[in-house]
Image (cartoon, rainbow, N blue to C red):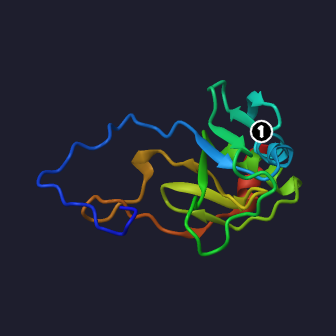
Amino acid sequence: MPDGTPLPQTAAPRPGAPAAMRIGHVHLKVAELERALRFWRDVIGLEVTQRAGDQAAFLSAGGYHHHIALNTWDSRGGPPPAPGTTGLYHVALLFPDRATLGAALRRVLDAGITLEGAADHGVSEAIYLRDPDGNGVELYRDRPAENWPRDAAGGLAMFNRRLDLQALLREASA
């Protein structure tokens, strides 16, 4: 609750979200729309589906109305959020396979963008970076669910190991 009061406990569990639910889109506040477009459109490869002048742009992969929206409505010229404050940790973009993730890595490196990390999590392979406004970005691909690591009880056993970036780049070239 906004005043710090804990939420009341419910007597019975509530039904969960349906398994088919997906996150449809994310809106990001940016300081400069054109700078943000150079990253999200030109490096990441999303397509602009609509613009609202110099205030907002909507971007998509595969013709969806928008996966990422960029706007300057409350943030034109503003600084990135200060470290140690709340907000978006990262937005994660799921690539369909290892080759397309490798191609995205190549575009990121060719643009001179510094990686913050790269990891093999067992269930996925991920690359971490920041957009020009300081928003965290994860580019990743999932392994097939039947190949996910499991513990003896059948629960997920994710881990955090070094991702071989050179092998990923070779996969993109193949």
How many marks the image carries: the answer is: 1
Mark 1, residues whose alpha carbon is within 10 Å: few (<14), some, or many (≥20)?
Answer: some
Residue at 88%, 59% (x, y): give it: 112
Residue at 36%, 69% (x, y): give it: 4
Coordinates of residue 156 in the picture (x, y in percent): 36, 59
Quarter holding the C terminus is top right
Q: Circle 1 sits in a helix, a strand or a loop, which is it? A: loop
Residue at 64%, 64% (x, y): give it: 163
Q: To which residue does mark 1 refer?
A: 55
Q: Residue furthest front?
A: 3
The answer to which image quadrant residue 114 occupies is bottom right
Q: Is residue 172 left or right of residue 67?
A: right
- In this rendered view, identify the residue nearer to me: 118 or 2: 2
Note whether 66 is above or below 148 in the view shown. Answer: above
What type is the residue that disc 1 sits on? Gln
Coordinates of residue 152 in the picture (x, y in percent): 27, 65
The answer to which image quadrant residue 63 occupies is top right
Coordinates of residue 137 in the picture (x, y in percent): 66, 55
Quarter holding the N terminus is bottom left
